[in-house]
Image: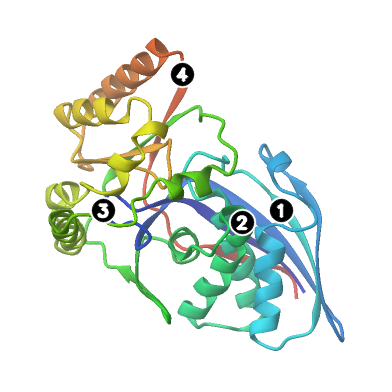
Amino acid sequence: MELKAKAYSSSANLGPGYDVLAMAINLFYDEVFVKIEKSDRISVETVSVSGPYSSYVPLHENTATVAAKEFLKRYGLRAKIKLKIVKNVPVGRGLGSSGATAAATVAALAKAFNIANTNELVEIAAEGEKVAAGSPHPDNVAASLLGGVVLIYSRKPLKVVKIPLKIKPKILIISPEPIVIKNKTKYARSLVPKTVPLENVVFNTGRIAALITGFIIGDLRLTGEGMEDSIIEPARKPILPLYFEIKEKLKEMGALGVCVSGAGPSILAMFDPNTPKNVLEKIRKYVIKEYRKKGIETHVYDASISDEAKVEVIKG
């Protein structure tokens, strides 16, 4: 059997939801071609990696191969699997690049073997993230696999739920050229404080509740107010050039909510779906100009919330 799976980029945290909230973004996507043959043992091999970011993906062990091996082991399956990865999601920008590859792989295997346990599939895909981040992180892979906005509300056992969206916002993704940091995700996580004042926890809890409630009742202004974080973003200021200045200006210019996308440096800005194009264009020009003053080139993309990973059977 041969299948092709497509999984979209994602934005984790959404402000206060560190490691528990993520959104699938239709900006970029990875594709994984999966060929499955009968075998009396487990064999997983990446035979090729192509696409604009292929140089970042090792052939021997990557998020796809690790996720595929975990899938077979989890369900006691024996098969020979060959993977072809098309790497389109930019690496090191906080857009869930490694998670998209793992999610596409698991989506294809779930289709092939008729597995529908959402929590287990997310957990398996998260195992693939170990290669990139050192430990499994289910938020990005959950969004890429399931689409929409997801909430990880339990880690042991892992439990995930899609948040019902009564309204979808317009989104701008501001993606500066990243500062070259070895093992960026690990470093970004090392900046997270081990203990925080109770008032910060209370603040973030209230904002998460507002964010989720806003999506459910269709109040994007409430959701935007919920995208405020008093714990993680301030701690990561050293690796987020211009973020705090840009954030306040974007809100003055009409953004309902602004947050760092994952570990950054990309920024997610959310707008009312009826926001005029000229307002967004004004923001685009402002952002590019401000980063250039600091010698940083940046890209500003239009985006929206994407659907779940797509799987197509090429040969049954």
- In this orientation, which residue lies closer to the viewer: 190 or 80? 190
Cβ–Cβ below 8 Å for labels 3 and 1? no
Q: Name the residue at 60% across, 38% down.
A: 182
Q: Is residue 296 above or below residue 28?
A: above
* Label 4 to label 1: alpha-carbon separation: 30 Å
Mark 4 sits on what residue? 296
Q: Is residue 220 left or right of residue 177?
A: left
Query: Which callout, 4 or 2, points to the residue nearer the camera?
Result: 4
List the single residue furthest toward the top.
293
- Dot 1 crowding, Cα within 10 Å, few <14, some 14–19, many 20+: many
* Label 4 to label 2: alpha-carbon separation: 28 Å
Mark 2 sits on what residue? 101
Q: Is residue 225 above or below residue 18?
A: above
- Dot 3 crowding, Cα within 10 Å, few <14, some 14–19, many 20+: many
Mark 3 sits on what residue? 16
- In this orientation, which residue lies closer to the viewer: 113 or 203? 203
Residue type for callout 3: Pro
Disc on the earlier residue, 3 or 1: 3
Q: Is residue 211 left or right of residue 64?
A: left
Mark 1 sits on what residue? 85
Tell me residue 81's x, y (percent): 79, 71
